[in-house]
Image (cartoon, rainbow, N blue to C red):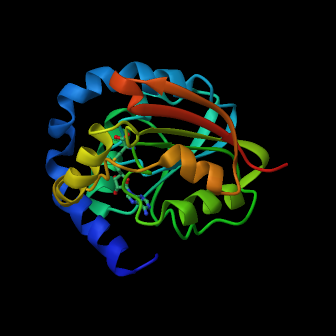
Amino acid sequence: MTNNHNTKKTRARYNRIAPVYDLMEILPERRFVPWRQQLWAQVPPGQVLEVGVGTGKNFPFHPDSITVTGIDLSDGMLARARKKARLMDKTLDLRQMDAQALDFAADTFDAAVATFVFCSIPDPLVALDELARVVKPGGKIFLLDHVRIDRPVIGPVMDAVNPLTVRLTGANINRRTVENVRQSSLLIESVTDLGPLDVVKLIVADTPA
Ligand SMILES: C[S@@+](CC[C@H](N)C(=O)[O-])C[C@H]1O[C@@H](n2cnc3c(N)ncnc32)[C@H](O)[C@@H]1O
């Protein structure tokens, strides 16, 4: 587990938010559900790593054809994910782990998924390269996340408000996640624009074959 200052702060924030996370997300979640379905419908059969499982909001959408290992930095979020899995009678391997230092051998998974996680990982480029390492060559990475809106006024406003959203919710609202994936060792296959002003992206990337 990486224990640098920013990672410790991120863990502490999500442990604090965990008891109210599902409540906070009730309204936006209505919009997210079809996007989650759109993502999981594309995940190929096999061993799948879900990064930042949070409270387990994706569990209802996991296809039967996959075996999921879920990780999260926050033990508070994971405790809720474990409860949700029990209530759903769902078998999956849930572990506390940092996406920036994955405790898996190279080429372990057929695919990896992260929804609304790369906005909060302190060093997203390190985590993207970790995904490239643990997913088999030619395997797929699916990311669903909100990003900075690169338009006059709105973009700079997002930059200005960002320190507050990070402190309150753990999420950076001005992350350039598509550009981060381009900078990583992953290869972008598609980017689908979603939501108002295309603020949400569904990114599908491949690990180099
Ligand atoms: C906004 S929540 C999203 C949770 C869930 N994926 C969803 O779609 O509702 C972000 C999650 O990412 C986790 N997270 C943040 N940084 C992480 C890291 N470095 N490694 C693993 N999980 C991390 C947080 O603890 C939190 O549970």
From the top left corner, tell me how far across and down residue 62 is, in percent.
Answer: 51, 30
* In the displayed structure image, the side of residue 191 where residue 144 appears, left or right: left
Q: What is the residue that sits farthest to the bottom in this orientation?
A: 4
Residue drawn at point x = 62 percent, y = 62 percent: 130
In the rendered image, residue 77, in percent from the top left (x then y), is placed at 29, 54
Left or right of 156? Residue 204 is right
Residue 2: horizontal and vertical position, in percent? 45, 77
Query: Does 106 sit left or right of 15 as displayed?
Result: right
Residue 197 found in image quarter: top left
Q: How many marks?
A: 0
Up the image or down, 122 lies above or below 29; here it is below
Q: Nearer the viewer, residue 50 or 163?
A: 163
Q: Position of residue 129 (x, y in %)?
A: 64, 61
Taking 146 as reference, is 194 above or below it? above
Q: Is residue 76 above or below residue 147?
A: below
Q: Residue at x 21, y 35 (%)?
A: 25
Q: Which residue is located at x 59 percent, y 57 percent? A: 128
Q: Residue at x 57, y 36 (%)?
A: 203
Depth check, front residue: 3 or 159: 159
Q: Residue furthest right?
A: 209
Residue 85: which quarter of the image?
A: top left
Q: Nearer the viewer, residue 150 or 51?
A: 150
